[in-house]
């Protein structure tokens, strides 16, 4: 039900919380929350245009029927029109299955706990550092008053209290209890509809009896609801972890604010802390934060209307201590959303967030786009976190140059810029704010950005952190075989991945990619990389490709600009994704079966098989150019990789791996298309393809009694080889690369001879190719060639 004028806070004392005991400023908060509710409803509908079309359709139906059949028939027709807008949601069913399957890997909930927990702690430390800097600057200013210095100290105390209470809250029974309740209800408890799973309400829980027109009490209806609960289990786990961490942050912020209020009222710090812990619970109703949206939802559940509804909401906000319940809860909810990457995408924010908000509206309106953008709000918030610490401070300083040149003070410059940019620049808005806490957070973000950038630049320049590595796929694979890992920290002789530690990974990954671009670029391209802007653009592109939550965007652009290669690739990805719990099976089953070998996906059917236990082991193995199998487990242990997202590896002591990595050349396996046949499509009696068997034979055949690895080691250690340069010049490759190719080709030819004996079809294809080649050289016609190859035809 839409809010009434009273509930919207219109007029003095009219809104909920504006009456006696509601606390100062509640009417303004109610007004803003009402606007946010309207915005949220519009976004849920797919944007203003989509909502307008739906309303226009309903109005037209009512008017048309009312003219001919009366108002009663018109109301029935409107009900039918609304139901028609909810026609059988085939894409909704598909998307819900796809999203939950993607979330089903055990690493996903673990990642979604580690990230917000680290962010909560880091943001707390950041705010304290910013508050201390503000106090230091104000203390050095002759214009600062004692009251201002005292407010700065209060901001420091607030930050310290909140950080301590966040740590306590993460282990509290209240946070864990809220998470468990969210798991049962498949919905966020504290902040419904604002979790990391940002599907609109009308596209959630699609797999249910109601969707298929069944009764919940019927046998088929109960079966469908049970299946739907199983399908949505990964999303429920995500919601539970999000809710638990959000409750810890909400209560910490609220308790810190209330503790300061208690001290202001003359209580001792100990008494104020106890009083705050008791009063903080009054900010909740059935576990939900007391926002206008949640209170109205509760009133709807109680079937309250009119004056009874308004009176009940005002009663929930009234309190004898005259606390601003709505305001305190609103501030605490903002802090909780900030630390869990669930901030709403507002209309008056930065251009990046406004564009993202429009994209969210489009995807909500067109469910067929959801496979390309499963999540929008959370990825945008993760990227915004990095931008607000690295980009915003630099842009703000640049914008302040002109006002400072006009003789304005820093404070005047910020107010001037705030009048121009409003909330589109969060940094400027917070720096110009009169609230000490907001100023402290802004200065904290500036300090944080400086620290992260300086540390990242030093570490990347020294090779202590890695980026994406070489552009050449084969070169990157050879590098990985030496123990190197992309987006990792080098600790001793081990690489530890930071790729899943967002939002921090974005900053370090961007800086590491900047250095990797020139480090691994071939000599002929080095001159093109001298432009700083070009380097940064390439670095940003490479970093975005590494983000799993941006893969859908990469797929979408690939389908548009590189259709021939991307359509089959995306089809195989979808085939793998729609198998129930595919994320879980692809990680867990190989660990239980101790199957370490990574598998090839050569067709859509292989995509299905790769996610189905019992079939994934029948797929061809991934192999390097020497025929060695590639292990799927990043740290070498299946018992940690299937649930722990932070992987690692040790640098290899194998002389072959070390030499290949040093040469920085992409040694590639042979092409599967041979003699007019696709060797991957020719299967032997065991189901192994001719191509996989050919690569496997690289390791089995012997020349002079030596295996390929033995011969390669002998070559690398030879005096002749060591005298050769390991670098090329211009388009001339290193002579070492040439020698390695010669050796591999000898074993490749020997392996092929054995393949001919095991796969007669390949042997026949080769003979036919030779016959055709000789016939063409002697001038025979196509008909005569065809007759000699296919005499029965």
Image (cartoon, rainbow, N blue to C red):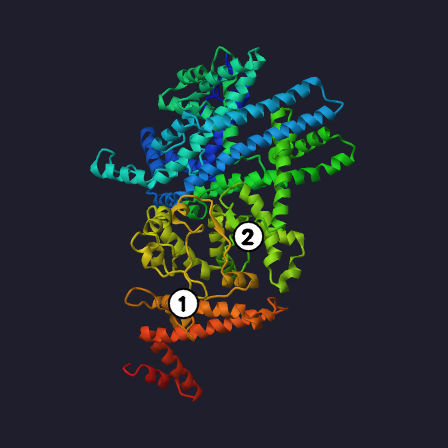
Extreme left residue here?
A: 219
Tag of residue 340: none
Find the distance from the CA under tag 2 to the CA under tag 1: 35 Å
Q: Residue at x 45, y 33 (%)?
A: 194
Mark 1 Cα-neighbour bin, 10 Å: few <14, some 14–19, many ≥20: some
**Residue 68, picture quadrant:** top left
Residue 442 falls left or right of residue 59: right
Q: Residue at x 68, y 17 (%)?
A: 147
Q: Is residue 537 visible?
A: no
Q: Position of residue 512 (x, y in %)?
A: 59, 49
Extreme bottom residue here?
A: 778
Q: Position of residue 657 (x, y in %)?
A: 50, 61
Provide the residue designation for mark 1: 699
Residues at marks 2 and 1 touching, judged by CB atoms closer than 8 Å: no
Q: Nearer the viewer, residue 637 or 250?
A: 637
Numbered-mark total: 2
Position of the N terminus, as image quadrant, is top left
Mark 2 Cα-neighbour bin, 10 Å: few <14, some 14–19, many ≥20: many
Going from the N terminus, do you reach mark 2 or mark 1 first?
Answer: 2
Task: Describe the element under mark 2 as helix, strand or loop.
Answer: helix
Tag of residue 542: 2
Q: Nearer the viewer, residue 499 or 394?
A: 499
Q: Position of residue 491 (x, y in %)?
A: 54, 47
């Amino acid at each position: 039900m839409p809010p009434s004028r009273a509930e919207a806070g219109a007029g003095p004392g009219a809104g909920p919380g504006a009456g006696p005991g509601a606390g100062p400023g509640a009417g303004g908060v109610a007004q803003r929350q009402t606007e946010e509710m309207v915005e949220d409803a519009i976004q849920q509908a797919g944007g203003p245009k989509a909502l307008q079309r739906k309303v226009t359709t309903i109005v037209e139906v009512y008017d048309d029927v009312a003219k001919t059949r009366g108002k009663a028939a018109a109301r029935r027709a409107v009900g039918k029109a609304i139901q028609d807008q909810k026609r059988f949601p085939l894409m909704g069913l598909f998307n819900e299955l796809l999203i939950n399957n993607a979330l089903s890997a055990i690493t996903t909930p673990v990642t979604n706990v580690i990230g917000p927990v680290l962010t909560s702690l880091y943001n707390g430390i950041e705010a304290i550092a910013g508050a201390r800097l503000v106090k230091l600057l104000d203390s050095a200013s002759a214009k600062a008053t004692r009251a201002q210095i005292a407010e700065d100290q209060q901001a420091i105390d607030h930050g310290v209290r909140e950080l301590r209470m966040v740590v306590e809250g993460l282990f509290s029974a209240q946070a864990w209890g809220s998470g468990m309740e969210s798991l049962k209800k498949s919905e966020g408890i504290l902040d419904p509809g604002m979790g990391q799973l940002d599907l609109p309400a009308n596209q959630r829980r699609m797999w249910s009896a109601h969707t298929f027109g069944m009764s919940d009490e019927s046998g088929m209806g109960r079966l469908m609801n049970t299946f739907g609960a199983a399908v949505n289990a990964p999303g429920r786990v995500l919601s539970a972890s999000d809710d638990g961490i959000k409750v810890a942050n909400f209560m910490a912020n609220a308790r810190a604010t209330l503790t300061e209020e208690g001290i202001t009222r003359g209580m001792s710090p100990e008494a104020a802390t106890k009083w705050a812990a008791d009063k903080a619970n009054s900010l909740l109703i059935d576990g939900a934060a007391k926002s206008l949206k949640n209170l109205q939802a509760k009133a709807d559940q109680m079937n309250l209307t009119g004056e009874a509804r308004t009176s009940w909401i005002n009663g929930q906000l009234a309190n004898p201590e005259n606390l601003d319940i709505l305001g305190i809860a609103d501030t605490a909810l903002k802090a909780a959303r900030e630390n869990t990457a669930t901030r709403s995408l507002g209309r008056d924010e930065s251009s990046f967030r406004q564009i993202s908000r429009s994209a969210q509206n489009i995807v909500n309106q067109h469910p067929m786009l959801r496979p390309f953008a499963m999540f929008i709000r959370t990825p945008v918030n993760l990227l915004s976190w990095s931008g607000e610490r690295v980009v915003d401070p630099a842009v703000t300083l640049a914008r302040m140059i002109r006002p400072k040149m006009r003789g304005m003070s820093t404070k005047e410059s910020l107010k001037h810029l705030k009048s121009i940019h409003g909330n589109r620049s969060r940094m400027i808005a917070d720096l110009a704010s009169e609230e000490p806490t907001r100023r402290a957070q802004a200065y904290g973000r500036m300090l944080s950005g400086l620290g992260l950038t300086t540390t990242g630049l030093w570490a990347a320049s020294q090779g202590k952190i890695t980026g994406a590595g070489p552009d050449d796929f084969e070169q990157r694979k050879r590098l990985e075989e030496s123990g190197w890992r992309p987006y990792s920290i080098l600790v001793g002789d081990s690489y530890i991945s930071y790729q899943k530690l967002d939002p921090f990974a974005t900053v370090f990954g961007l800086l590491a990619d900047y250095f990797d671009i020139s480090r691994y670029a071939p000599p002929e391209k080095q001159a093109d990389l001298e432009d700083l802007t070009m380097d940064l653009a390439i670095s940003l592109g490479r970093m975005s490709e590494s983000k799993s939550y941006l893969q859908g965007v990469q797929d979408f652009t690939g389908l548009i600009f590189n259709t021939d290669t991307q359509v089959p690739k995306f089809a195989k990805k979808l085939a793998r994704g729609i198998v129930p719990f595919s994320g879980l099976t692809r990680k867990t089953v190989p660990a239980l079966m101790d199957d370490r070998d990574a598998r090839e996906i050569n067709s859509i059917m292989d995509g299905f098989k790769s996610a189905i236990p019992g079939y994934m082991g029948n797929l061809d193995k991934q192999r390097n150019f020497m025929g060695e199998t590639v292990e799927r487990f990043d740290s070498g242990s299946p018992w940690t990789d299937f649930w722990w997202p932070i992987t690692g590896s040790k640098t290899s002591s194998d002389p072959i791996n070390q030499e290949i990595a040093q040469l920085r050349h992409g040694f590639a396996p042979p092409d599967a298309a041979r003699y007019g046949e696709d060797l991957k499509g020719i299967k032997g009696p065991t189901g192994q393809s001719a191509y996989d068997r050919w690569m496997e034979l690289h390791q089995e055949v012997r020349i002079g009694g030596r295996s390929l690895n033995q011969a390669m080691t002998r070559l690398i250690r030879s005096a002749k080889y060591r005298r050769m340069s390991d670098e090329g010049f211009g388009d001339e490759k290193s002579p070492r690369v040439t020698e390695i190719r010669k050796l591999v080709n000898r074993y490749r030819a020997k392996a092929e001879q054995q393949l001919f004996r095991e796969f007669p079809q390949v042997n026949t294809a080769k003979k036919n190719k030779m016959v055709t080649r000789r016939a063409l050289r002697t001038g025979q016609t196509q008909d005569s060639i065809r007759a000699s190859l296919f005499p029965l035809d």
